[in-house]
Image (spheres, rainbow, N blue to C red):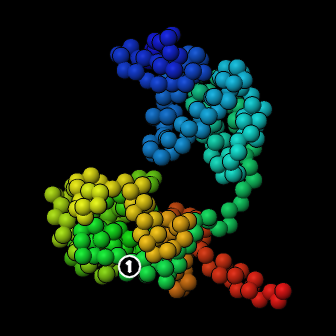
């Protein structure tokens, strides 16, 4: 594929058929092979929108770092990668993310013969051992309080109760809830189920317990959605108490959740993901096998499920309360 670089603005590269494509200055200056590799990496290899956004940010940050040093792509060495990571004012996990993005980016440049070697391949990442996740747990009592505090006399309250009910009783991520359509709630003959489209392209069917089924049925009766392809959860029209046709984004759901938490004087650190932590911890505390909880959470590795287990924190708290000082 051939490119004609706009010399007035090196951040713009235009394909011969006229389609504009933004590329960083260093990439545009490195020639057609580097430009092709950049677009292949960002738009071809990174299919998940969130991963694409994060990796693109990491790569652009490094390229700006190189610009300040007046370096080209072919001049980058492992030392440059290491010094870039050292000056990042971030936690170890974020630095590992930057290193992973650079390794994949330079791998693509090497495969397209834009650079000779991958300078990030030999750079060691930060030592990081995660025993317990950082997401705060909301707790069973607080979750019950939050659910029961919702005024369901209006359509917005019915919507919010249904969303929080899904968070509690399915342990799915907020993104999977935001992508639900009306047809994803259905009767299989013996019970009602929800069909979720989750990260990594996973499609999962999770049965609805009886109270969650009622939450959803009452909401759908009041909402009167157009058809099965309609978004299951839509935004409200300001303070009118009515809904429109715009689907709720993960950010909309997170803001709703935090607003409900504030009304109940719950800690501001809580997020929708806190419900996932609480559900997983509660099931493990109730003696549900780890494999079953892992399956509900949609984890491919049981070690990931254990990161959500907060039972050890309770044991630690009991120990420190016994200190006699």
SS class of the residue under badge 1?
A: loop
Foreground of the two, 134 or 144:
144
> Residue most toward the front?
239
- Tell me the residue at 44%/44% (across/down): 49
User: On the rendered structure, is 12 left or right of 131?
Assistant: left
> Residue most toward the top?
7
- Residue that badge 1 annotates: 149
Quadrant containing the N terminus is top left
Residue 218 in percent (x, y) is at 22, 75
Residue 199 against residue 287 in the figure, above or below? above
Specify few, some or many for label 1: CA neighbours under 10 Å numbering under 14, 14-19, or 20 or more: some
- The answer to which image quadrant residue 251 occupies is bottom left
Residue 266 in percent (x, y) is at 51, 73
- Tell me the residue at 53%/16% (across/down): 10
Residue 189 against residue 92 in the figure, above or below? below
> Residue most toward the right?
325
Residue 248 against residue 314 in the figure, above or below? above
Residue 185 against residue 211 in the figure, above or below? above
- Tell me the residue at 48%/37% (across/down): 45
Residue 37 in percent (x, y) is at 53, 26
Foreground of the two, 109 or 262:
262
Residue 305 in view, yes or no: no
Residue 279 in percent (x, y) is at 48, 76
- Tell me the residue at 28%/72% (across/down): 158
User: On the rendered structure, is 87 left or right of 137?
Assistant: right
């Amino acid at each position: 594929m051939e490119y004609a670089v706009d010399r007035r603005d090196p951040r713009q590269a235009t394909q011969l058929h006229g389609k504009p494509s933004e590329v960083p200055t260093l990439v545009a200056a490195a020639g057609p092979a580097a430009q092709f590799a950049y677009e292949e990496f960002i738009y071809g290899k990174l299919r998940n929108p969130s991963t694409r956004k994060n990796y693109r940010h990491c790569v652009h940050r490094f390229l700006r770092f190189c610009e300040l040093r007046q370096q080209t792509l072919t001049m980058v060495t492992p030392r440059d990668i290491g010094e870039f990571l050292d000056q990042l004012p971030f936690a170890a996990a974020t630095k590992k993310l930057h290193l992973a993005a650079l390794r994949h980016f330079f791998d693509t440049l090497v495969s397209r013969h834009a650079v000779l070697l991958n300078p990030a391949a030999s750079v060691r990442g930060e030592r990081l051992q995660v025993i317990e996740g950082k997401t705060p747990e909301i707790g069973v009592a607080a979750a019950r309080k939050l659910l029961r505090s919702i005024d369901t006399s209006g359509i917005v309250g019915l919507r919010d109760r249904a969303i929080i009910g899904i968070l509690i009783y399915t342990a799915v991520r907020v993104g999977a809830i935001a992508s639900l359509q009306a047809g994803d709630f259905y009767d299989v003959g013996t019970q009602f189920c929800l069909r979720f489209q989750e990260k990594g392209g996973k499609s999962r069917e999770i049965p609805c317990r009886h109270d969650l089924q009622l939450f959803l049925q009452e909401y759908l009766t009041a909402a009167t959605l157009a058809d099965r392809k309609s978004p299951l959860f839509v935004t409200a029209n300001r303070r009118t108490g009515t809904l429109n046709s715009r689907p709720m984004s993960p950010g909309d759901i997170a803001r709703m959740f935090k607003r409900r938490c504030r009304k109940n004087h719950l800690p501001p650190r809580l997020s929708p993901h806190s419900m996932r932590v609480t559900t997983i911890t509660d099931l493990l505390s109730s003696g549900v096998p780890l494999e079953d909880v892992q399956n509900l959470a949609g984890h491919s590795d049981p070690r990931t499920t254990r990161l959500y287990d907060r039972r050890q924190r309770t044991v630690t708290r009991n120990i420190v309360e016994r200190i006699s000082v």
